[in-house]
Image (spheres, grey):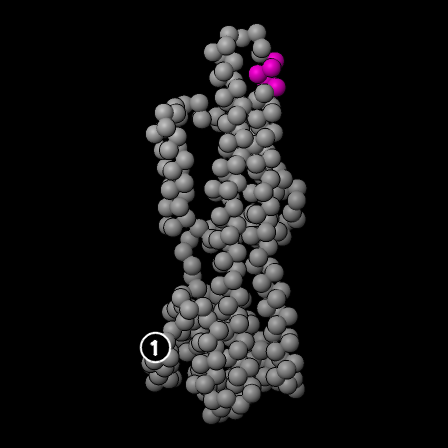
Amino acid sequence: MLVAFGYLVIVLAVFGGYSLGGGHLGPLFQPVELLIIGGAAVGAFIVGNDRKAIVATLKALPHAVRGSKYTKELYMEVMALLYVVLAKIRRDGMMSIESDIDNPEESELFNSYPALQAHPGALVFVTDYLRLMVGGNLNPFQIEALMDQEIDTHHHEEEMPARIIAKVGDAMPAFGIVAAVMGVVHTMGSIGLPPAELGQLIAAALVGTFLGILLAYGFVGPLSSLIEQRAEESTKLYQCIKVTLLASMNGYAPAIAVEFGRKVLFSTERPSFAELEDHVRQFKAKA
C-alpha cells in the first residue's frame, strides 16, 4: 500500500506540477519512448543475469510491494518457540527433541507455531543447529562461526535482487538518452516538415530523456532500496535465532536466552521485556 501511495505522490507531483505551470500533458504521452526505454531495460536485465538471479528478482518484487512480514508478532512467536524448545531440552535432555527436529513439519511442537512454518528457511536454520547441538561435538565458538557464515550467505542471496534492480535503474537514464537520440534522428530525417510538426517531433524526442530519469530515480531506484530493507529484516530473524541458541549453549536459562534474542531486534519490532515475558508465559502454560 505504501509503495502504491508513494508512486501516486510522484506522479501527482511531477505531472501535476507540470500542468500547474501551464504545460500540456498530451505531448508527454509517448508510448514508443516507453517501449524503447522499458524494452531496453528488460533486455539488459535478461542479458546481465543468469536464470537463478532472474527468478530470485521476480520473486522478490511482489514481497517488496506488499507490507513487511517481519513483525513484532512474528518475533514474539519465534522466541516463544525457542523458549519452549530450550526449556524442554533443559528439563528432559537433548534427545527429547530429536524426533521434533528430524521432522518439524509433522511435529506437534513446531506446528503449534505457524508463523515460523511460514518462513521455511528460518525453520531449517533452527532445526539444523538444534540437530548439531543434539548430536554434534562442536563448541559454541564453532557453532557461532558456522552460523555467521550461513547468515552471510543468506544475506548475500537476499540482497542480490536489490543490486540487480539498482543496476537496471542506473541504466535507465542512458536508455532515455538513446530514445531521445533516436527521436532527434527521426526529426532530422523529417527536416522538410512545417515548423509546427518539427516542434512536435523534437518535444517527443526530449520526452525520452525525461522518462528515463523519472523511471530511474522515481520508480526503479526506490524499489531497489525497499528490497534491500526487506533483506535486512530477513537477516535480523536469523540473527535473533542465532543469539538465542548460542546463549543457551553457553549455559543461560531459556528465559535469559530469549532475552538475548530480543536485544538484537530493530527497535520498531522489538517487544518490551514485559511483553515478551507475558507472551512466553502464555506459551509456557500451554506447553
Observer-nearest of 192 and 277: 192
Question: In which quadrant is the C terminus drawn?
Answer: bottom left
Q: Count the marks: how many?
A: 1
Give the residue at x 63% y 52%.
52
Q: What stretch is highlighted in magenta?
A: 185-189
Observer-nearest of 35 and 103: 35
For the residue labelled by badge 1, is the local secondary structure a helix, a strand or a loop? helix
Query: Is 186 inside the magenta-drawn segment?
Result: yes
Residue 68 pos. (x, y %): 42, 59
Residue 108 in view, yes or no: no
**Relative to 144, 264 lies left or right:** left
Name above or below for residue 238 compared with residue 34.
Answer: below
Name above or below for residue 194 compared with residue 16.
Answer: above
- Quarter of the image for residue 102 reads bottom right
| Classed neighbour count for the residue bearing mark 1: other residues with Cα under 10 Å, few (<14), some (14–19), many (≥20) | few
Name above or below for residue 108 compared with residue 206.
Answer: below
Residue 59 pos. (x, y %): 52, 52
Query: Is 187 inside the magenta-drawn segment?
Result: yes
The residue tagged 1 is 275
Name above or below for residue 11 compared with residue 92.
Answer: above
Observer-nearest of 143 and 12: 12
**Relative to 250, 10 lies left or right:** left
Give the residue at x 57% y 22%.
183
Q: Main secondary structure of the magenta part?
A: helix
